[in-house]
Image (cartoon, helix red, strand yellow):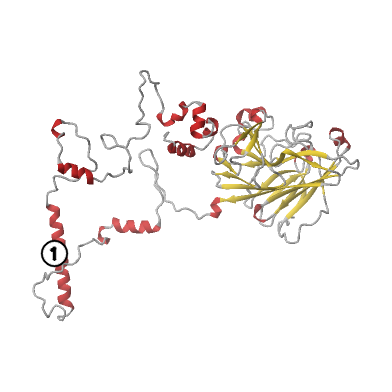
Amino acid sequence: MSTPERRPVEVVKAVNGLEKVVLREIHGCSVEVYLYGAHVTSWKNEHGEELLFISSKEIFKPPKPIRGGIPICFPQFSSLGPLELHGFARNRLWTFDDDPPPLPPDIANKVFIDLILRSTKEDLKIWPHSFEYRLRITLGPGEDLMLTSRVRNTATDGKPFTFTFAYHTYFSVSDISEVRVEGLETLDYLDNCQKMERFTEQGDSLTFESEVDKIYLSTPTKIAVMDHEKKQTFVIRKDGLPDAVVWNPWDKKAKAMADFGDDEYKHMLCVEAAAVEKPITLKPGEEWRGRQQLSVVNKSGSEKPQRSRSVSYSSDRPRARGRSPAFNALASKFDNPGGRNLSTPPPLLSNLGGSSEGGGSSSGGGSHDAYKALSKSKAIASLTASFDKPSRDKLMPRSVKAATSDSNSRINPLNSRVDAVTVKENVKENEVEDDEGLTLYPYDRLTTSSTNPAPNIDVTRREMYLSKADFRAKFNMTKDAFYKMPKWRQNKMKTSLELF
């Protein structure tokens, strides 16, 4: 019995009788969109792996909005206006357009749908503006998901209207502590956790150790969300949406939300293409367009796999790096004494075999081979004889230590000459050493004249003891921004400032 062919676009009944549209691309990736809220609730790659986050406590029951996926925030983002949180578009029933305008002819192998929302009498009571909102959802080859919003002012009274907007995308991540966001560094942002105060982002990328609710302003058209544990990167490309919102509720707010699991904050991150700081104004007949394209880069698929070898790991045996086949071949020869080619001195130039006048070159191959064998055997004998000699009494030392007794206090010209030519291994040029030849690091050379020094100072975290003003003067950033940076970048900066 053959399985029925799965159509590229299909409308099906879902949870609680709600209708959803399923889009399927020829390579196996898929998207699910609920007509309630025009809400994308699933985006799977060709392997069937879910790329969006949906809360396990979501019940899909109107009039509550759906928690997760890609909610549409229109005509208001967040609570920045008189309407309900994030506007009303996400909890309205949209219309499926059976005959949408076609895609451009140069776009092949793409599946798309158009959903439409128009103002109703109920909507006009809370937001007195006539509009038509057309949302096109396109699924293309390579798992690309594109959302294109077109909002048109259909008013007949000649009045313009203003709105804010966001694609409130919930990305599914392995662990929020393993995620970083690139493309927003050094930008200004409004911090909703600090009463919408304006700050400037520090550091090379965003990492997460606590609640974040920020609106980044005048952002680039491309933002990357990197999941190190999954070895995959979400790439957000946007047009007509100058801002970007980054949100994670963290533990306290997660526990306070009825439709959100207590620990689910660890497995999601919202990075939202938005237009918030400068609201969009449309006159009658005008249309605004805002586009977001999502794609996934799988690192393991784009890079060659690393060679590896299995080794045990414990506290007294560190993990070993993988060996290349060339190294293994060389090592096998080295481990086999019979297969090694011992280095020998060059043949002696003198005639070790006695007289060879006239016959050395004309007596044939036998005499020549005997000469070579004799030369080699004598050379090896001379070399091995030196092995039995007693070792030298005085060898050039690794490093010359300071004399500690009076008997060694006299200056010896020979010793002075040895000091001058001594080569010190593992010591950098101009690096300070102690009496035992060990390197003195900057914090070891720290001295104090205080008669009552502070106890238990952690010399590896000396920046903690700087005042806020001194910290900013030395690091050119605040302590809070510094500790949000990855540990490796903190250590690199402290090393450059001789604070490590």
Whether residue 211 appears in this view of the structure is yes
What amino acid type is highlighted by mark number 1? Lys
Residue 271 lies in what quarter of the image? top right
Seen in the image, is 494 located left or right of residue 333?
right
Query: Looking at the rendering, in which quadrant would you find the C terminus?
Result: top left
**Residue at x 23% of width, y 46% of height:** 421
Residue 406 point in image, percent of width and height: 14, 31
**Residue at x 28% of width, y 34% of height:** 434
Whether residue 1 appears in this view of the structure is no
Q: What is the residue that sits farthest to the right in this orientation?
A: 157
Query: Looking at the rendering, in which quadrant would you find the N terminus?
Result: bottom right
Residue 399 lies in what quarter of the image? top left
Q: Which residue is mark 1?
A: 378
Please, what secondary structure does the residue beneath circle 1 have? Answer: helix
205, 261: nearer the viewer: 205
Residue 48 point in image, percent of width and height: 64, 49
Seen in the image, is 495 located left or right of residue 425?
right
Q: Quick check: 82 above or below 69?
A: above
Q: Quick check: 20 above or below 373?
A: above
Seen in the image, is 376 located left or right of residue 76?
left
Residue 39 point in image, percent of width and height: 74, 42
Numbered circles on residues, count: 1
Q: Quick check: 76 above or below 356?
A: above
Residue 43 point in image, percent of width and height: 67, 47
**Residue at x 81% of width, y 55% of height:** 101
Q: What is the residue that sits farthest to the top in this orientation?
A: 452
Circle 1 Cα neighbour tier, 10 Å, few/some/many (<14 / 14–19 / ≥20) = some
Seen in the image, is 163 located left or right of residue 30?
right
Residue 142 lies in what quarter of the image? bottom right
